[in-house]
Amino acid sequence: MPTHPRRKTRQVIIGDKLHGFVGIGGAAPVALQTMTSTYTYDIDATVKQINDLHHAGSDLVRVAVPDKRDTEALKEILDQVRVPIIADVHFHFERALEAIEAGVHKIRLNPGNIKDRPKVEKVIAACKERGIPVRVGANEGGIVERQDKGQRAEEQAALEQDYQGQMTSIMVEKLEEYLRIFADNDFYDVVLSAKSVDPQIVLSAYSEISRRFDFPLHLGVTHAGPPETGRIRSVVALGALLAQGIGDTIRISYAADPIYEVEDGKELLQVLGLRPRTEPELIACPTCGRIEIDLIAMMAEVRRRLAEISVPVKVAVMGCVVNGPGEAEGSDVAVFAGKHRGVIYVQGEQVATVTEDKILDALFAEVRKFAEKVQRGEATLRNAKVEIKPPDPIGELGSGWEKIRREKGLSLPVMKG
């Protein structure tokens, strides 16, 4: 379970009756999202990927809309999917207006790229009319000033002196400046993010934002790389923040098929007790000189076969008698091996001893039997599903709001839900 209770935030609601509703912040569980890797104008490929990602467990799916042909495809895409869709807008505010007209459920704006106030206000007005939230997403790669040469030189000089500290300051300050436009337009259905390739910047930026504002936060590490290294960057930053109660929706980003983002995001939330487990959990001992079976090959086959099971059974595969008995006691179904044999346990009770060549079949016979008992109500999982307790009623938080109030003399609304 997280070390700290969830941070108290406002709540935004994303979706509609056809695509379902997802709450972000407030008492809602941490939501999982990802982004398609298809060209959005390729309707068939985009629809297939969205549906695959939703089936895998993504609560929200974001699509890129860099061109008008992408926004023109949105209505047909929305007709064929059943998950809330976010339009990712970076350079042209017109794409946001077109996406809103097509019926998307949330807009992502980048304050580093779309910062002309009249354009931002047009997007805000359209979102306000339709009841669509906006994510204000700052990225390390696009937040440094590009047009004002003097300001750019100042920011780059500061970054050369203290990159991590100054990048955090730049992202937080520009988010705060951008939010003045939203506050002036009485629009508060906002989610914030401040992503970086550096997990330390991610940690410091989100920690600072969480102190200043009570908006829900979307967590992520940008440009994380392939899954082999990207999952380390992501888990270090996102896991640490979530364990502190910071974060209301997450995306793990890889240079790979986004299905891996969903799989790893689910696992992260599950191990932190922030999402109920809905599929089997596999644990296995680290390999060492004590193992007396081909543990690596066996574990791979166990994982493949577990895809057939629809109950969150905890299965342990242990290669020797040192850790095996202890792990068997903590699992629903377990096997530990010794001298080319396997001893199989079901919830701490020994049920079979078989030779190595029969371990897999015997283990899965017990897994299926136990899963069927759970489904019939004749057995209870050792690790029950986690119930997420909603936070206490919330109030206005953070120096960010206080600063805007002082400057603009605003009367801010009481937070919803």
Image: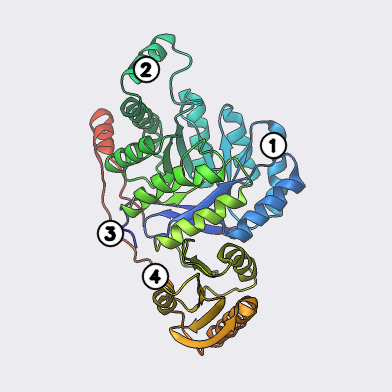
Whether residue 59 is visible to the viewer of this picture, yes or no, is no
Q: Which amino acid does label 4 sit on?
A: Glu
Where 366 sits versus 13, above or below? Answer: below
Residue that label 3 marks? 393
Quarter occupied by the N terminus? bottom left
Q: Residues within 10 Å of mark 2 (few under 14, many from 20)?
A: some
Q: Report how far apart the C-alphas of labels 3 and 2 lie in the structure.
A: 40 Å
Q: Which secondary structure, mark 2? A: helix
Q: Which amino acid does label 2 sit on?
A: Glu
Residue that label 4 marks? 387
Where 203 sits versus 177, above or below? Answer: below
Q: Earlier in the sequence, mark 1 or mark 2?
A: 1
Quarter occupied by the C terminus? bottom left
Q: Residue furthest top?
A: 150
Question: Residue 307, image x and y in percent?
Answer: 63, 68
Q: Residues within 10 Å of mark 3 (few under 14, many from 20)?
A: few
Q: Which secondary structure, mark 4? A: loop
Observer-side mark, 1 or 4, equals: 4
Q: Report how far apart the C-alphas of labels 4 and 2 lie in the structure.
A: 46 Å
Whether residue 187 is visible to the viewer of this picture, yes or no, is yes
Question: Residue 197, image x and y in percent?
Answer: 46, 34
Q: Report how far apart the C-alphas of labels 1 and 2 lie in the structure.
A: 34 Å
Q: Which of marks 3 and 4 is nearer the N terminus?
A: 4
Q: Residue at x 40, y 39 (%)?
A: 199
Q: Which amino acid does label 1 sit on?
A: Asp
Residue that label 1 marks? 70
Observer-side mark, 3 or 2, equals: 2
Say the numbered circle drawn on residue 155. 2
Q: Earlier in the sequence, mark 3 or mark 2?
A: 2
Q: Which amino acid does label 3 sit on?
A: Pro
Question: Residue 2, image x and y in percent?
Answer: 33, 59
